[in-house]
Every structure is written in structure tokens, then in C-alpha cells.
Amino acid sequence: MSFDVRHPHQSLTLGNAEHLTSPGPAVPGARVLIASDCPAVEILRQDVVRQNYSATIATTGRAVLETFASYDLILLDTDLPDLDGVSVSRAIRQISTIPIIAFASADEIEKVLLLETGCDDCIERPYRTRDLIARIKAVLRRAALAQIHTSQYPAAVPPAPARQRVVPPPAGARHDTLPHEDHGRIVSVADRLVINPALRESRLDGRLLPLTRKEYDLLELLASAPGRIFDRAELMTKIWDYPAGMPINAQSSRTIDTHVSSLRRKLGHRDWIANVRGVGFRLDVPGRRRTDRGAHPRLVPVGPDERPGQGVLRLLDATESA
């Protein structure tokens, strides 16, 4: 894949290359890993070195995953020969917060996927050198400030649990909304699932759940209102920062389904997260909502005075286990 640099250095004389020598890098001596196998990658490496950074090229996704811990920033091409950029970003984000800038096409969906898997920024191909360098400095500056903040203000010990209070069911919730208690900041669902936002930890029956960042965010949101149905658009907006009002396409729906499926496996039972067909998802507890579904029809008249055949129906239990 070619980066199509709009201002390659080969066409610049020393006099008109002034825009490439802005004062000092945001993080002097920062180590940059460039993940790409395209022929123009050496031009990109030279752009980075001119800013007094060190730069190394990795031509495969496997090489990136094996060496990224030695660097301060990753410039990620999305079309590596063995792994796509989304997979590389997702794998890194499970274990590291290293800044990642991805090269993306004009396709908005590709940018959304890269950002939702953990990339800090995306730059569209063909890129302008000045724009790329500015983004590198901005991302490194934010990372450096975050490290300073962490060193000056270490994570505080979680406060002692406040007096237990029962959270009222959300408006419009069904009468069988699950028991949900908020012990200060710690959320407990049905005395089994415990979520601690201060530590970003989730425990089921005392067992720590090995969740990725997005899996934790999704579970925490669902647990904030057990029994409430969260539609797909709301999940994409709140968890994946999807633009509000934008229609949810099939690829975005697959993203949600993939995370829900992974969460179900880690929770040990698919019934923890119920899929209400055509609507969305809700947090449930295995066994709590189980009834003899053969004892009554799924659709019955709304009120006792309504006669069969009037066509006014309500859905008793539309939960699908998908």
C-alpha cells in the first residue's frame, strides 16, 4: 500500500523544507515504531527522523506485537501482509496504552473501527507531512501530560462504601427488574455480579473477569440499569463513540454482537445478556426470568376486556437468547 505523501522530501530543496523543521519534538528522543510494508515507508521514516525522533520500521503485524513495548508511539498502516490494522490495534489495547496513530482510507467506517479499537488518532491517506508531524506531537504531548498527572496524582484508595442504597428501577422498566444495589461507587447485581468503576474491575461470584476495555465498558453500562433494554444505537454512541444520529449499519451491529458474545463466554452463561429481537440488549441473571413458557401464549390481549381477534396485542416475553 502506498502512503502517497503529498509533499515528499525528494521534491523539496533545503530552502522550501522549512515547514518540516518546527521547533523540537513534543517528547525529545521519542521512539516511533512505523508499522508498514509499503515502498514509501522509508520516506515516512525520514519525515519522523527529521523531527529528532528515532524511528524503526516493522513490516508485519506480528513484528509490531512482538516489539511495540520498546517504543513510545506507533504509526500503524491498516494493510499489513499478515494482520489488518484493526486487529493489531485491538490486541495492543488489551495490554498497553501506547499512543497509536493509524493511516486510514477515506472510508468513515474504517476510521470509526480504528478509533473504537483504541487508536488515538487517524490520518487520511494521502497524508500531508506537516499534518502528520503535528498529530504525532499532539499525541505524544497528551501521553506525556497523562504520565505527569499519574505520577503527581496517583490513584487514590477507593473510599469506604457508603451506606447501602437501593437504586430505583428506571422509568418504564418491567416489574421484574433485577435487584440492583449501588454501594457508593461499587455496583452489585443480584448479589453475584460486582462492578468497581474505581478499579475498572468486574467480579462474578467473587471471580475476577478478564475483560477487555470495551467489554468492561459494555458490561458496566448494562449493569447500570439491569432489566433496561439498551438499543444498538445507544450502545454504539456510549461505548464506541459512534456519531449520534448516524444509522447503525451491519458492520457496527457485528461489532456489538461480537462483544456481547465474548462477554457471555466470560460470564459463563449466555442468559446474562438477553437479546430482545429488533430492540437491543439488557442485563439479566440466568434462571431468574425462567418460566414455563409453554404455560401461556407469547401474545395475549392487552386488557381483560379485549376480545380475541381485535388485533391489539402486547409482547409478554420477547427475550431471544441469540
Image (tube, rainbow, N blue to C red):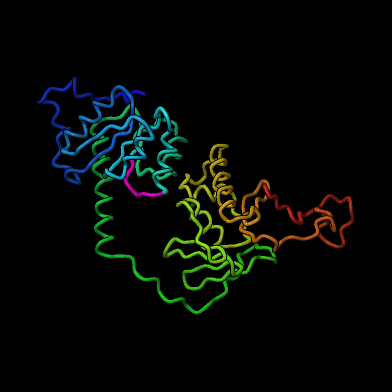
Numbered range of the magenta stretch: 95-100
The residue at 36%/71% (across/down) is 157
> In the depicted view, which residue is nearer to us: 83 or 188?
83
The residue at 89%/50% (across/down) is 309
In this picture, residue 241 sits left or right of residue 285: left
In this picture, residue 240 sits left or right of residue 34: right
Q: How far across and down, in percent of the image, does residue 205 sit?
A: 57, 65
In this picture, residue 68 sits left or right of residue 198: left
The mark tally for this picture is: 0
Picture layout, residue 126 above or below residue 290: above
Q: Residue furthest top?
A: 11
Q: How far across and down, in percent of the image, does residue 159 sit?
A: 40, 74
> In the depicted view, which residue is nearer to us: 70 or 34?
70
Q: How far across and down, in percent of the image, does residue 121 sit?
A: 35, 41
Is most of the magenta stretch helix, strand or loop?
loop
> In the depicted view, which residue is nearer to us: 225 or 201?
201
Q: How far across and down, in percent of the image, does residue 291 sit?
A: 77, 60
The residue at 12%/22% (across/down) is 13
The residue at 54%/50% (across/down) is 235
Q: Residue furthest front?
A: 66
Picture layout, residue 232 above or below residue 59: below
Q: Residue furthest bottom?
A: 163
In this picture, residue 276 sits left or right of residue 92: right
Q: Quadrant of the N terminus?
A: top left
Picture layout, residue 148 above or below residue 4: below
